């Protein structure tokens, strides 16, 4: 039996909160051992996507030599080779190996064939010889396609005041006439000195 003064018997009781029997705000915390479920109307977080690999990144240049610029308007974004042949030897040319540079960047080289990796594109190969002073400067422009090997030959001159030669085939050494004439003159001078010494005795 209920009394008329009981607030639960009055449907218009202003003191009775709505949804008194349902879950209340702030009381939805999960019990121990239960995970919090997704909020109604929410969406699961998106799965992280791997960052796209940009063209010309580190993986695109596994053997890129140091000092060369990254791919640009003049480069194709792959690797090719310059097969540079330094003609002569320490006995027939110069005891000091000619100095070589590609696009202004020095690269190590030795007499004979040098297989030099470069980014594909247009490059300038230059070289010079040294003996007290720098001489025999020469340069040559090449277009290297991806995976291609481009032959280049350099021949230092036989005398310091002559030019060096560089090109796609074996080059001649400048100053040969002067060098031969100089050698003949030295031999003649030696013979004259020997003859003078013999006559004086």
Image: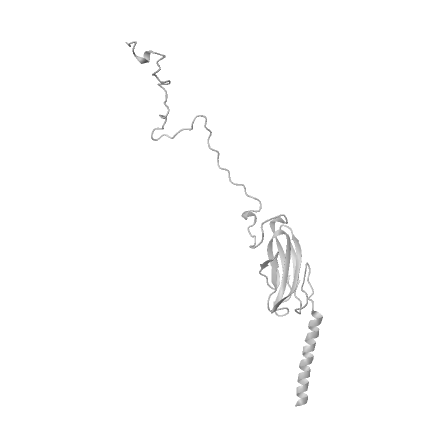
- Is 42 placed above or below 102 here? above
The image quadrant that residue 123 belongs to is: bottom right
Percent coordinates x, y for residue 178 in the rendering: 70, 72
Percent coordinates x, y for residue 39 in the rendering: 42, 27
- Is 69 placed above or below 92 here? above
Q: Pick the residue in front: 41 or 79.
A: 41
- Rendering colour mode: one colour
Q: Pick the residue in front: 110 or 121.
A: 121
Percent coordinates x, y for residue 129 in the rendering: 62, 65
Q: Quadrant of the N terminus?
A: top left
Q: Pick the residue in front: 99 or 9.
A: 9
The image quadrant that residue 184 belongs to is: bottom right
**Residue at image coords 67%, 78%:** 186
**Residue at image coords 67%, 88%:** 198
Give the farthest residue toward the front.
Answer: 14
Percent coordinates x, y for residue 169 in the rendering: 69, 60
The image quadrant that residue 191 belongs to is: bottom right
Q: How many marks?
A: 0
Q: Quadrant of the C terminus?
A: bottom right
- Is 178 placed above or below 77 here? below
185 with respect to 11 (left or right): right
26 with respect to 42 (left or right): left
């Amino acid at each position: 039996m209920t009394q008329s003064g009981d607030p639960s018997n009055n449907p218009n009781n202003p003191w009775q909160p709505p949804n008194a029997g349902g879950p209340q705000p702030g009381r939805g915390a999960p019990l121990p051992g239960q995970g919090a479920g997704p909020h109604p109307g929410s969406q699961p977080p998106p799965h992280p996507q791997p960052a796209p690999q940009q063209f010309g990144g580190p993986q695109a240049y596994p053997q890129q030599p140091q000092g060369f610029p990254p791919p640009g308007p003049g480069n194709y974004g792959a690797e090719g080779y310059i097969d540079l042949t330094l003609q002569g030897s320490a006995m027939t040319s110069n005891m000091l190996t000619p100095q070589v540079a590609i696009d202004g960047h020095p690269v190590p080289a030795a007499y004979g064939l040098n297989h030099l990796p470069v980014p594909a594109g247009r490059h300038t190969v230059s070289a010079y010889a040294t003996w007290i002073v720098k001489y025999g400067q020469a340069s040559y422009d090449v277009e290297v396609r991806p995976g291609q090997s481009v032959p280049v030959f350099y021949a230092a001159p036989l005398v310091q005041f002559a030019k060096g030669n560089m090109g796609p085939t074996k080059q001649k050494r400048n100053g040969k006439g002067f060098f031969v004439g100089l050698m003949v003159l030295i031999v003649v001078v030696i013979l004259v000195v020997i003859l003078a010494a013999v006559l004086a005795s």
